[in-house]
């Protein structure tokens, strides 16, 4: 048993099954999460990071842990993925990453691009989830991750259509967006791009899920990983910014993207835009409509 006084020293989010035995002497709350609580833990084994949720959807933590394990298995040595120290259905403890100040060392962007190119060479046998015994989830959203060989249909029927339907039903996007999508549906194979084998994707690769440590090493965190198409990650990287031109140039030099990938970006950005529309409202629904209009031409 650990020796701390729980009532005096630790938030109740940090339950015994998550932290007992780690020798936690201090837990400092961290900001930044919109659905979870985060903590810096000072422990007998050094500094660790903990993320907790009071009532997460079933299997959500297990899916994230599986994603972290898969990424660690397939990234090159110079691209980091945090080690999972312990996890429960309500939380994860993992190694601490000491982030760099705002100024990043030269070459950081190129290293990031090269590392992602190496990750995207990992091959699966089918598009879908990492483990058939885990529930189908992308973050908190329930999705169908059963194996399939048809990527274009996977993207249209398991991602874009259901999310757009949810956005319309919740009033987050104009109803005519469904008509726009049905105009585009016959072009689903074209919009998904040339066929590629299933690739391990991070699944939520915005700038906040890529860290750079004090030594200039890039790290990938908080994955929603599955076997998909690498343009999923590329489009997400471009949606909110935060990745330099040198990153994409290095990626394309190592693992060239298929011709026309820039024109496909709006199609691949629809799922994250619709997720954000459902969750946050604001201008995300309008942005999704603009993407549909661009694709319609």
Image (cartoon, rainbow, N blue to C red):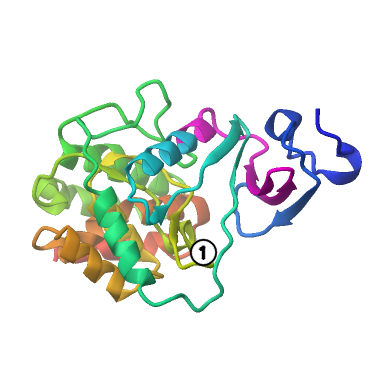
| Residue situated in front as seen by the camera: 16 or 186 | 16
| Residue situated in front as seen by the camera: 75 or 68 | 75
* Vertical relation: 204 (above or below) 104: above
* Relative to 206, 254 lies left or right: left
Q: Position of residue 201 (x, y in %)?
A: 31, 46
Picture residue at 68% right of the left edge, 57% below the top: 30
Q: Position of residue 78 (x, y in %)?
A: 37, 56
Q: Which residue is mark 1?
A: 213
Secondary structure at numbered mark 1? loop
Q: Please give the count of numbered marks on the rendered protein.
A: 1
Q: Using a 10 Å C-alpha cutoff, classify the residue at mark 1 as few (fewer than 14 neighbours), some (14 to 19) or many (20 or more).
A: some
**Do we see residue 150 in this rendering?**
yes
Q: Position of residue 197 (x, y in %)?
A: 15, 40
Q: Position of residue 43 (x, y in %)?
A: 73, 45
Residue 145 placement: quadrant? top left
| Residue that extends furthest to the top in the rendered view of this protein | 133
**Do we see residue 292 in this rendering?**
no
* Relative to 93, 228 lies left or right: left
Picture residue at 10% right of the left edge, 49% below the top: 187
User: Does residue 227 show up magenta in the picture?
Assistant: no
Residue 169 placement: quadrant? top left
Q: Which residues are magenta?
A: 38-63
* Relative to 218, 59 lies left or right: right
Q: Quarter of the image containing the C terminus?
A: bottom left
């Amino acid at each position: 048993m650990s020796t701390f006084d729980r009532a005096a020293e630790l938030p109740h989010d940090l339950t015994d099954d998550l932290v007992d035995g780690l020798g936690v002497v201090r837990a400092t709350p961290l900001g930044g999460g919109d659905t979870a609580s985060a903590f810096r833990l000072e422990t007998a084994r050094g500094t660790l990071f903990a993320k907790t949720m009071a009532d997460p959807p079933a299997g959500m933590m297990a899916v994230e842990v599986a994603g972290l394990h898969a990424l660690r298995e397939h990234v090159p040595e110079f691209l980091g993925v945090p080690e999972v120290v312990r996890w429960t259905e309500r939380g994860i403890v993992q190694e601490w990453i000491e982030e760099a100040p705002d100024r990043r060392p030269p070459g950081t962007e190129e290293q990031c691009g090269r590392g992602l190119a190496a990750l995207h060479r990992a091959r699966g046998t089918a598009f879908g989830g990492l483990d058939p015994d885990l529930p189908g989830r992308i973050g908190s959203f329930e999705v169908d991750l059963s194996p399939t060989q048809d990527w274009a249909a996977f993207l249209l029927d398991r991602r874009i259509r259901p999310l757009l339907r949810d956005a319309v039903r919740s009033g987050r996007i104009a109803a005519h967006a469904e008509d726009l999508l049905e105009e585009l549906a016959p072009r689903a194979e074209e919009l998904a791009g040339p066929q590629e084998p299933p690739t391990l994707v991070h699944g939520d690769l915005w700038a906040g899920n890529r860290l750079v440590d004090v030594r200039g090493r890039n790290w990938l965190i908080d994955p929603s990983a599955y076997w998909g198409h690498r343009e999923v990650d590329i489009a997400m990287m471009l949606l909110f910014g935060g990745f330099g031109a040198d990153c994409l140039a290095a990626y394309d030099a190592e693992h060239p993207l298929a011709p026309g990938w820039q024109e496909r970006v709006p199609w691949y950005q629809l799922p994250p835009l619709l997720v954000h529309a459902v969750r946050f409202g604001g201008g995300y629904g309008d942005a999704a409509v603009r993407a549909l209009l661009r694709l319609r031409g």
